[in-house]
Amino acid sequence: MRGLFVVSRAGAPLNHLPGPWHPEDVHRFAVRHGLTFEGRVLSREEYAGLASRVRDALP
């Protein structure tokens, strides 16, 4: 399972964008928009837990 999560400052998952995302591209996007970027490897359970709590997701 691969995807990109947008997380609030409080740590709540806001958005989920599934699919492979190249870390350099995401980092460049974050810098350009004044956001913080953190790359992480999640277990299947952690990923599913975050995905189930987002307010907005793409299929």
Image (cartoon, helix red, strand yellow):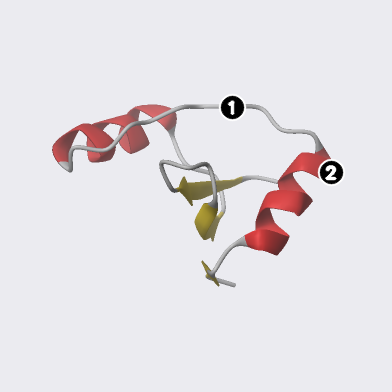
Q: Is residue 46 left or right of 21 when viewed as pictured?
A: right
> Residue 24, percent across and down?
35, 27
Q: Secondary structure at mark 2?
A: helix
Q: Quadrant of the C terminus?
A: bottom right
Q: Which residue is mark 2?
A: 45
Which residue is painted at 77% across and 52% down in the image? Answer: 48
Q: Secondary structure at mark 1?
A: loop
Q: Crowding at label 1, few (<14), some or many (≥20) Cα neighbours within 10 Å? A: few
Which residue is painted at 76% across and 51% down in the image? Answer: 49
- Tell me, for residue 40, which label it has, or none: 1
> Residue 22, percent across and down?
44, 35
Task: Using the numbered discs, state the Cα–Cα distance from disc 2 to disc 1 in whole angstroms.
Answer: 14 Å
- Tell me, for residue 22, which label it has, or none: none
The vertical placement of 40 against 26, above or below, is above
Asked where in the image residue 9 lies, by quadrant, the reply is top left
Which residue is painted at 51% across and 47% down in the image? Answer: 4
